[in-house]
Amino acid sequence: MGVSLRGFFISRIIQLVVTMFIVSVVVFFILRLSGDPILVVAPDFFSEEQIEQMRKFWGFDRPIGEQYLNFVAKAITGNFGTSYLAKRPAMELVFERLGYSWMLAAAAAAIGLTIAIPLGILSALKRNSFVDLIITSLSSLGTAMPSFWLGLMLIIVFSVHLGLLPVFGALEPKAIILPSTTLGVGMAARLSRMTRSAMLEVLNQDYVRTAHSKGLMHKTVVMRHALRNALIPIVTVFGLQLGWLLGGSVVVESVFSWPGLGRLMIDSISVRDNTVVQAGLLFFSLSFILINYAIDVIYIILDPRIKFQ
Amino acid sequence: MTPTQSAQQAKDSAIADLPARRSPPRQLLSTLLKSPVGVAGGLIVTAVVLLAFIGPLISPHDPLNRNIRSRFKPPGFVDQSGKVYSLGNDQLGRDILSRIIAGSRVSVLVGVISVLISGALGVIYGLISGFVGGILDSVLMRIVDGLLSIPFIILVIAISGIVGAGLSTLILILGFTGWITYARVIRGEVLKVREMDYVMAAYALGQSRLKVMFLHILPNVVASAIVLAAVQVGVTILAESSLSFLGLGVKPPTVTWGLMLSDGRQYINSAWWMTLYPGIAITITVLGVVFLGDWLRDFLDPNVRGRA
């Protein structure tokens, strides 16, 4: 397996480069969607000459292909340009916020998994019972609910009426409770459904029947034989929902004024600070890609049958 | 495999093996009536679409009518002339129930038109990729992988932030980004259908490639597209509400549920009803779409029926 493991990593790295190339093209051209990027930021009172000068200064007078290559060459070295607003490197701003976003996403994912896996298993074991009906209904409800609205309702109950939890910012440790619960519940709703169907699938397999007929305890069969195999599709869905989690975090961070990357992007979009928007987009995509790569490695650990491809 | 590819497989396999079955409308209706979830979904969706069309006729008040004297009135408020405001009033004294009715129009418009655009684009893209195959297929699929690794809502937020929004722009943005979801699934379906005997037979009868593609392959991947589209209607309605809530979507005076929530957030300390009701409207609508989608999937895919 030694050789193929190396091959696995090399092919993954090539794919990462290709994927990031496409992402960079999209991110670069999104900025041009608004037409002339200079006119967006130039003050109204600037003369034609001053605008021309500014255009030259930012390199917007060059052919579009050259501009793209410049953008990529700089981006690789971590230079996304200077924020129009903060007058600081966009990268610096992104890094300041990244930790907060990861903290929130990790807490939400932990809450999501803690709720979803036990409920999903219970739902599958008690299939078509009243408990199952309740769990699947709650899961549908959680999927249909806008996450930011759930956040607002939590604020009304826990902050406004009960006065238990802070509404804004990240000044005290308890401030993470509401935003992470908001996202975690949405995540749980999506994951529990998949856990249920993955478990049902596995419970019908021959090896589960064999384990039962060996006289193993039901609990042992479920935990040792069924759950481990069901984890593979659950992990897959977790990777898929990560996009939802990152996207949801952008909106939820705004609701709770959580100082993460998502809020930075929204704030930057509203003042047209486009270098920051670009850097933020690239970092969101990179996080998404890298976590999915990590998930591919987890597969191999969970299922020795999956070959390095 | 690329990062999102592995994740995407879950989605692919969920819709895999959809045989193309065409049934007369009567059969469709009779199976719908047998499924409680399908009936619930159908009723909710019909009700919302109906509200979008005849809303102004049954609306208790004018959704845009301001009245300083009845600002922030709680649910059940009755004014001097005896008019009832059952869900309360907002910060400008506008009736919340009437605004929820008016807001259904935007949700229906956005949900239907964006999904039609993105579905058509995605099906054509996947059809070409799967049918032509070879290098073109690899290139087209790598592009999809790249695009899929930008979380959907973040992409949409960035584009609408930069392009600037409004109802029609928003519909176009959601339509022209949503196709990515369909491309890979449809391509997978095409690869399967392409090898079917009836396709071979069509070639043997001397039909052109173009004819085979549109007359024999396309109709057989439509079922998967419909199932995905149902899911996407919900996703799109949620996306619209998020964008409008953030101030990047539809602008006032157009009434949308997302904008109502954005107003509600500002007065969250005093007027909870401004936040509660529009959110319930979104949740019920999306729930209806999800239920209808679940039923459609079971109906179009007999392999899944009765299971899970």
Image (spheres, coloured by chain):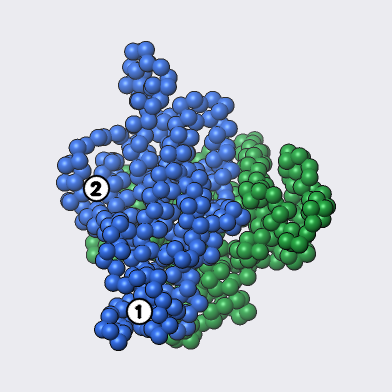
Tell me if I can see residue B8 in this picture.
no
Q: Please, which chain is the residue tagged with disc 1 on?
A: B
Residue in the picture at 32% in, 21% down: B198
Secondary element under disc 2, as helix, strand or loop, is loop
Colour blue, chain: B
Which image quadrant is residue B12 in? top left
Give x and y (percent) for residue A260: 62, 67
Dot in front, 2 or 1: 1
Give x and y (percent) for residue B271: 42, 81
Task: Name the residue nearer the viewer: A14 or A198.
Answer: A14
- The residue beneath circle 2 is B306
- What amino acid is labelled 1 in the image? Gly
Give x and y (percent) for residue B160: 56, 55
- Colour in which chain A is shown? green
- The residue beneath circle 1 is B88
Q: Please, which chain is the residue tagged with disc 2 on?
A: B
First in residue order: circle 2 vs circle 1 = 1
Secondary element under disc 1, as helix, strand or loop, is loop
- Locate residue B245 relative to residue B100 in the image: left or right: right
Q: Name the quarter where the N terminus of chain B is drawn.
A: top right
